[in-house]
Amino acid sequence: MNSAVRGVRRLELLTPDPVRSVEFHANLHQWVVLAQADDRFSCWVGERRTAHIRRPEPGETPGWHVVFGGGRRRGPRALTDVGGGLHAILDTGRVTHGPWAPEPREGEPCWTELVTADPPGSDTYWTTHAGWEFRPNPEPGTAVYQIEGRAIAGRRTAAAADHTAGWICHLASPNLTESLQRAVELGGRVAARPVHTAVGHTAAVICPDGFPHAMVENPGVWAGALAGQPAGPHPH
C-alpha cells in the first residue's frame, strides 16, 4: 500500500520552556541544534532531523508528538484516535526514521510505541488510517503494527500504574547506564530502569519539563530485536 505510513519524519516536543528542554536533550543525545525565531529549535544527528522543539500553540497538547511520513494528501494533518484521546501527525514528506531508513545512530528515533486504554479501538483506528497491518505479540497486551512484514510501531495496553498514554518515543543510546546517569546530572529523572523488552535493552527518563521518553541500547536497526531482519532498500 503506497499511501501507508512507513516510518517517522521527526519528533516534536511542545514545551513551555524550549530553551531548557533543548539544553537537556542536546546534551543527553548529542544533538546538533539550529536555533530559529521565537524559541524554536531544530535538532539534528548528521544530515537527519530528529526533533523540533517549540512552545505549544493555543489548543495544542504539551509533550512529545510523533510526525509520521506517508499518505496521499499533501502537507501535515492530525491523526486522532478519539476513543483513546491519542494523536499523531501525518506528513507526506520523506521518511527519515523507520525500517527502510538507515540504521539509527545515537540520539535518533529507533522505535515508537502506542500506549492505549482501548486496544481494540486503537487497532481499528491506526490500521485503517495509517494503512498498517495488525500482528499480535506473544506477550499479553501487546501488538505490532507492520507493513509487508516489517514492524513500524508497537502497541501495548495501558496498565493501571501508567501515568502516560499516547505515543512513546524511543531514541538510540550507545550505553544506557551512562545515558541514565547523564540524564540525572542534567536535571532529569529515571522513569524506568533498564529492562529487556521486545525491541532490546530499554529504559525511560523524564526531562526537567516532565515529559517522558524511552531509550534503547544499540538497537542496530529500526525496532531493534523485534525487527528480525536488517533494514533494506525502500520498496517501489
Image (tube, grey):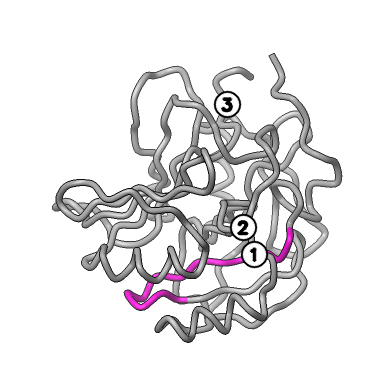
Describe residue 198's horizontal placement relative to residue 10 as left or right.
Answer: right
How far apart marks 2 and 1 lie (CA) works out to 5 Å
Q: Marks 2 and 1: CB-CB under 8 Å?
A: yes
How far apart marks 2 and 3 lie (CA) works out to 27 Å
SS class of the residue under badge 1?
strand
Query: Where does label 3 land, which residue?
Result: 4
Front one among 43 and 91: 43
Query: Where does label 2 land, which residue?
Result: 106
Name the quarter where the N terminus is drawn. Answer: top right
SS class of the residue under badge 3?
loop
Question: Does label 2 or label 1 sit earlier along the sequence?
Answer: 2
Q: Position of residue 129 (x, y in %)?
A: 50, 32
Describe residue 107's horizontal placement relative to residue 82 as left or right.
Answer: right
Write down the quadrant of residue 155 in the picture: bottom right
Question: Does label 1 or label 3 sit earlier along the sequence?
Answer: 3
Describe residue 34's horizontal placement relative to residue 107 as left or right.
Answer: left
Describe residue 216's horizontal placement relative to residue 26 as left or right.
Answer: right
SS class of the residue under badge 2?
loop
Q: Position of residue 157 (x, y in %)?
A: 60, 64
Residue type, label 1 = Ser
Residue type, label 3 = Ala
Q: Position of residue 232 (x, y in %)?
A: 78, 30
Front one among 85 and 1: 1
Please provide the residue range marked out in magenta.
206-218
Query: Where does label 1 land, which residue?
Result: 173
| Label 1 environment density (alpha carbons within 10 Å; few <14, some 14–19, many ≥20) | many
